[in-house]
Image (tube, rainbow, N blue to C red):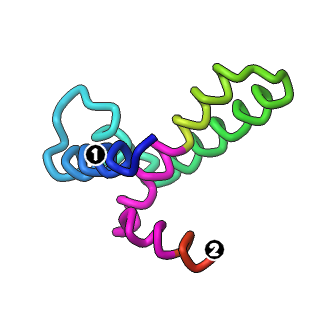
Amino acid sequence: MSDAVLDELFDVIEDRKETLPEGSYTASLFTHEKGENAVLEKLGEETTELILAAKDDDREEIAHESADIVYHLLVLLSMKGMDLEDLRAELEERR
């Protein structure tokens, strides 16, 4: 996976946050009545699903649930006014 994929996905998330198109799942996360709790709940749910997939050695499901976690993490970063550079900087510090 190239960095460009994450950058493109984050750009789409930011666009959905600004334009709030009807029928967009991403936009619905930004306008959900539970607020950021909706995203936090999804992160918890997807993490549990990833753990179960790993326990079952289900590579396809591990990839699927990992992608769900990354997506919801990016939505959370956007909600908090952060971006991929914040994430990259933290990861760089840990190298």
Looking at the figure, which quarter contains the C terminus? bottom right
What percent of the width, then of the height, locates residue 63? 61, 29
**For the magenta stretch, what is the residue range?**
70-89
Asked if marks 2 and 1 touch (Cβ < 8 Å), the reply is no
Residue with the mark numbered 2: 95
Choose mark 2 or mark 1, whichever is in front: 2
Q: Is 86 in the magenta?
A: yes
Is 45 left or right of 68, judged from the image as shown? Answer: right
Q: Which element is circle 1 on?
A: helix
Where residue 57 sits in the image (x, y, percent)?
81, 23
Q: Residue at x 31, y 46 (%)?
A: 31
Residue 6 included in the magenta stretch of the image: no
**Residue at (70, 23) in percent of width and height:** 59
Measured as percent of width and height from the top left, residue 90 is found at: 54, 74
Q: Mark 1 points at which residue?
A: 8
Q: In this view, does 83 lie above or below 34?
A: below
The vertical placement of 54 against 71, above or below, is above
